[in-house]
Image (tube, rainbow, N blue to C red):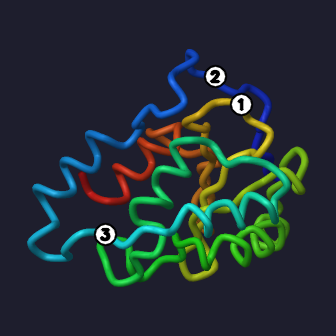
Amino acid sequence: MKSVALGKICSLPPTAKDAMYLSSIKDMYAKRYASEFGEPRGCSERDVKALEQDLGQRLPEAYREYLLWMGNDMHGRLKGSDWFISDVRENTVALPELLSENDVTTDKLDDLFCFFMHQGYMAAWFNLSQTADDPECFFFSEGNDAEEIDGPKVFSEFLKVELGL
């Protein structure tokens, strides 16, 4: 049985509440993709708060910033995968089954938040109990022996790689 350890959580130094975790990513995106895709379509603060209410807690700041920036941009650069606010509840419900079918065990399945899924065989998530504003992420892909994400370890870095920046 494969195991994904969720034990060690990298916490980042305290920052201002209004810190912009995605500023450089937004700038690179505008320079590289704005002419092709236009401005990303974000969620409203109300949509984000409704999701947080469903979860019973506030989402990490970097992920909130992503949702407000491009959390409804289904026809933009991330189209084709389930990244959007309308997908995360279903992704999170489907994640334990994907991991179980592939003999992957994790600590506290009820604490996982699946922000990305692709065609039911790839998923990325973070642990909701993390206190870091830019949470440590984990990745699984069927047919891949890698048990944890190789390369980017926090949400903002994962997003940057997936955007091709």
Residue plotted at (30% across, 41% down): 23
Q: For this view, does 17 lie left or right of residue 58?
A: left
**Which mark is drawn over residue 156?**
none
Check disc 3 and report its element: helix, strand or loop.
loop
**Which mark is drawn over residue 11?**
2
Q: For this view, does 86 lie left or right of residue 7?
A: left
Q: Which residue is mark 1?
A: 131
Q: Are marks 2 and 1 in contact (CB under 8 Å)?
A: yes
Name above or below for residue 129 compared with residue 141. Answer: above
Which callout, 2 or 3, points at the residue further toward the start of the chain? 2
Q: Name the residue type under label 2.
A: Ser
Residue plotted at (81% across, 59% down): 55
What percent of the width, then of the height, locates residue 149?
Answer: 55, 45
Near mark 1 (Cα within 10 A), the count class, few <14, some 14-19 or many ≥20, is some
- Locate residue 82: give its quadrant: bottom right
Which callout, 2 or 1, points at the residue further toward the start of the chain? 2
Q: Name the residue type under label 1.
A: Thr
Q: Which residue is mark 3?
A: 40
Q: Nearer the viewer, residue 102 or 37?
A: 37
Q: Nearer the viewer, residue 86 or 141?
A: 86
Residue plotted at (71% across, 31% down): 131
- Locate residue 110: give its quadrant: bottom right
What percent of the width, then of the height, locates residue 15?
Answer: 52, 21
Q: For this view, does 18 lie left or right of residue 31?
A: right
What percent of the width, then of the height, locates residue 129?
Answer: 80, 39
| Most distant residue in the front direction | 46
Near mark 2 (Cα within 10 A), the count class, few <14, some 14-19 or many ≥20, is few
The Cα atoms of the two marked residues, 2 and 1, are separated by 7 Å
Q: Name the residue type under label 3.
A: Pro
Q: Are marks 2 and 3 in contact (CB under 8 Å)?
A: no
Name above or below for residue 111 compared with residue 10. Answer: below
